[in-house]
Image (cartoon, helix red, strand yellow):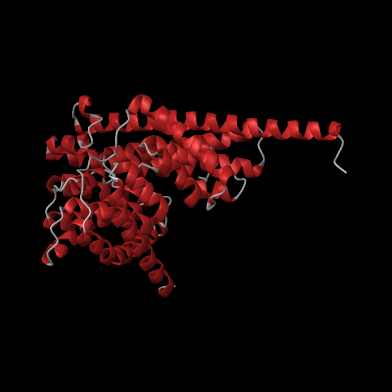
Amino acid sequence: MPPPIGREAPRQMSVYISIARLAAVTVAIGVGAGLAGMALVLLLHAVQHLAYGYSLDALIDTQSFLQGVSASPSWRRVAAMALCGLVAGLGWWALRRYGQPLVSIEKALASDTRMPARTTIVHVLLQIVTVALGSPLGREVAPREAGALVGGRLARLARLSPRETRLMIACGAGAGLAAVYNVPLGGAVFVLEVLLGSFNLSAAALALTASVLGAVVARLGLGNHATYAVPVFAVSRGLLLFAVVAGPVIGVCAYGFKRLTDKAKAAAPHEGWQLIALSVLNFTAIGLLAVRFPQLLGNGKSAVQLGLGDDLTVGLAASLLVLRVVITTSSLRVGAYGGLLTPGLAVGALLGVVLSGAASLVGATAPSGVFALIGSAAFLAASMNMPLTAIVLIAEFTRVVHPMLVPVALAVGGAMIASRVCAKFTR
């Protein structure tokens, strides 16, 4: 027998209230993460301007940072990076000594452990300021942590269940990523593939809602433009063949990069004078390198844009590739924090340009920018173990025509297979 109507109605009403509350929290998280992401990007631009003295009018130009750094005198590059080392060393030393223990997004998702507000905010600001000063690490972890913090706080304020709270933390992180890079779909796919490892419809709807709102809100202050400007590339049989052949090579390199950076993070000092001294030495050395190679400063966005724009010779790309890997690893080794998304894109793009030199020897005539595009996607996918997210991010970063995603997907597939094989045989 069906239950009496009088008992069923309150139960249905409770379900409706729960759904409405979850939807309201998701909307609030999207708006909050969007505002936080916008504020962090504006802060980053302001610090860059002050550090290197270029015009504020150029802040939304895709290459404004590289232009500003290139126009600055040599002493300013070294001084800015020495300051970066001091801020990084002192900042993270003080945070570890006087702040509450950091709680990563992954830990917050795996348990009911709360992310401490003050410690997380300081951690976020340190990442943004050091990247703005020229750190080679990525800026994407900071807005993800800010969004996750917003998500967790709002979920607990609304008294959501632990499972719903973890979902809101993940949605907040995705919305933060979507906000700073203007990638609404990429933010949602990142939540599903990387943070949750689940593609159920409910999680997808909530993740997409939060990420779209985060990106739309951030556009109010940052504008609606692609992260990278790329020409229209043509897809040829030779390019498809390159993608098939180059994918496994890129995958092996990405696996090596992942092993290298993981070891560097594990060996980093966590307290004492070494953290401060090594940070100052590391970043000052990067500043000295930037006297000759200004493309090294920052999270790698400038190098990616140069590669995609066909503005790099094979020789310069090879030099930047080696140096980029070295300074990324060394910065992690001395205890600095930051993401590896944009650095991974940069290494992949530079590797793609280098491989284009080999391709030209067998008659390939495509511009090097198209090889950089394929290399950046495949390297990002394999180094961060997120093939679907990498493809979607590349599509939104560059807004390339859809046919170009075919060789990108082929290279990503080959890179993932090669990376998994390497992991299997090196255990």
- Can you see residue 406? yes
Within the image, what quadrant is residue 182 found in?
top left
* Image quarter in which the C terminus is found: bottom left
Q: Position of residue 49 (x, y in %)?
A: 24, 30
Q: Position of residue 32 (x, y in %)?
A: 49, 29
Please report the residue visible at 84 percent of the width from the left and 33 percent of the height from the top. 5
120 in relation to 273, above or below: above
Q: Would you say 417 lies left or right of 234 here?
A: right
Please report the residue visible at 21 percent of the width from the left and 52 percent of the height from the top. 370
* Image quarter in which the N terminus is found: top right
Closest to the observer: 93 or 273? 93
Q: Would you say 287 lies left or right of 381 here?
A: left
Closest to the observer: 308 or 277? 308
Q: Position of residue 361 (x, y in %)?
A: 11, 66
Please report the residue visible at 58 percent of the width from the left and 43 percent of the height from the top. 202
Q: Position of residue 243 (x, y in %)?
A: 27, 61
Please report the residue visible at 13 percent of the width from the left and 40 percent of the height from the top. 74
- Can you see residue 143? no
Q: Would you say 196 lies left or right of 228 here?
A: right
